[in-house]
Amino acid sequence: MAVPKHKVSKSKRDKRRTHKKIEAISVGTCPECGEAKLPHHVCPECGVYRDKAVVSAEI
């Protein structure tokens, strides 16, 4: 079984973990209705994607 030969310092451990952070989700606004939506996704409110009605909006 593998056993570490020396203690890994806090600095070395934290440098290894720099890429494991969580980033906030980028949210844009729909050009048609102005509601918040994810980029490259159909607007959940009006059903428009790239200036075309893709999904019928059922209210």
Image (spheres, helix red, strand yellow):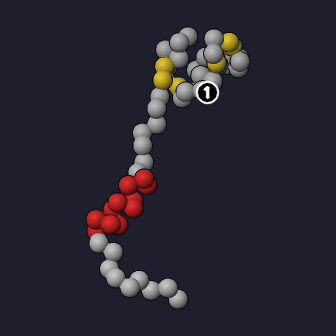
In this rendering, does residue 32 appear at all? Answer: yes
The number of discs equals 1
Left or right of 23, for residue 40: right
| Structural crowding at the residue carrying mark 1, measured as other residues with C-alpha within 10 Å and reported as few (<14), some (14–19) or many (≥20) | few
Left or right of 5, for residue 34: right
Residue 34: percent from the left, percent from the top?
A: 49, 14
The type of residue carrying mark 1 is His
Q: Residue shown at 41%/83% (left/top)?
A: 4
Residue 10: percent from the left, percent from the top?
A: 28, 68
Q: Residue shown at 48%/19% (left/top)?
A: 29
Q: Residue shown at 43%/55% (left/top)?
A: 20
Q: Residue shown at 71%/18% (left/top)?
A: 54
Left or right of 58, for residue 9: left
Which residue position holds label 1? 41
Residue 6: percent from the left, percent from the top?
A: 34, 82
SS category of the residue bearing label 1: loop
Q: Nearer the viewer, residue 31 or 10?
A: 10
Quick one: which residue is furthest to the bottom in this view?
A: 1
